[in-house]
Image: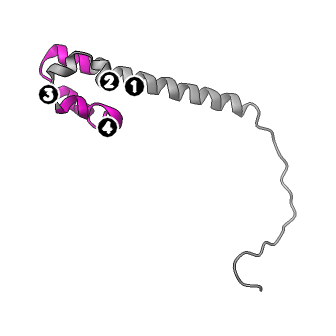
């Protein structure tokens, strides 16, 4: 996310880009409201939206694959026979 901020990250508080990058961006989303400069807040929001965009694309693709795979699921008849299975360490 810091790379998406570009030059704006250099003029921000040093902790803010670190808090909004890597895997902890979603946990620190409320920090965006603490950025008082409008141009910096806009840059932070754009970088945050960009990172969410990529996640949305990934999840949409995964759900599309899931729907496509579900077409090939076939019905299988289950056996009505009961088989006793002995499990454990005992020989009884």
N-terminal of the pair, mark 1 or mark 3, is 3
Magenta stretch: give its range.
15-44
Q: Is residue 52 above or below residue 74?
A: above
Give the Cα separation between the discs numbered 1 and 3.
23 Å
Residue displayed at 24% across by 16% down: 43
Q: Is residue 12 above or below residue 38?
A: below
Q: Give the residue at the far top of this rendering.
A: 39
Q: Nearer the viewer, mark 1 or mark 3?
A: 3
Give the Cα separation between the discs numbered 2 and 4.
11 Å
Give the Cα separation between the discs numbered 1 and 4.
13 Å
Q: Nearer the viewer, mark 1 or mark 4?
A: 4
Q: Which residue is identified by label 3?
A: 13
Q: Which residue is identified by label 4?
A: 24
Q: Are marks 3 and 4 in contact (CB under 8 Å)?
A: no
Q: Which residue is identified by label 1?
A: 52
| Label 4: which secondary element | helix
Around disc 4, counting alpha carbons within 10 Å, would you say few (fewer than 14), some (14 to 19), or many (20 or more)? few
Which of the two residues, 19 or 67, is positioned nearer the viewer here? Answer: 19
| Label 2: which secondary element | helix
Which of the two residues, 69 or 12, is positioned nearer the viewer here? Answer: 12
- Dividing the picture into quarters, in which one does residue 48 lie? top left
Residue 81: x and y, percent?
87, 64
Give the Cα separation between the discs numbered 3 and 2.
17 Å
SS assignment for the magenta stretch, majority? helix
Which of the two residues, 42 or 17, is positioned nearer the viewer here? Answer: 17
Is residue 6 part of the magenta span, yes or no?
no
Around disc 3, counting alpha carbons within 10 Å, would you say few (fewer than 14), some (14 to 19), or many (20 or more)? few
Q: Is residue 32 above or below residue 42?
A: below
| Label 1: which secondary element | helix
Q: Nearer the viewer, mark 3 or mark 2?
A: 3
Which of the two residues, 55 or 76, is positioned nearer the viewer here? Answer: 55
- Residue 48's disc is 2
């Amino acid at each position: 996310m810091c790379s998406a901020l570009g030059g704006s990250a250099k003029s921000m508080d040093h902790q803010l880009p670190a808090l909004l990058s890597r895997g902890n961006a979603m946990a620190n989303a409320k920090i965006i409201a603490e950025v008082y400069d409008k141009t910096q807040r806009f840059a932070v929001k754009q970088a945050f939206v960009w990172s969410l965009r990529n996640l949305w694309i990934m999840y949409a693709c995964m759900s599309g694959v899931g729907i496509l795979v579900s077409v090939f699921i076939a019905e299988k008849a289950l056996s009505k026979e009961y088989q006793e299975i002995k499990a454990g360490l005992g020989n009884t």
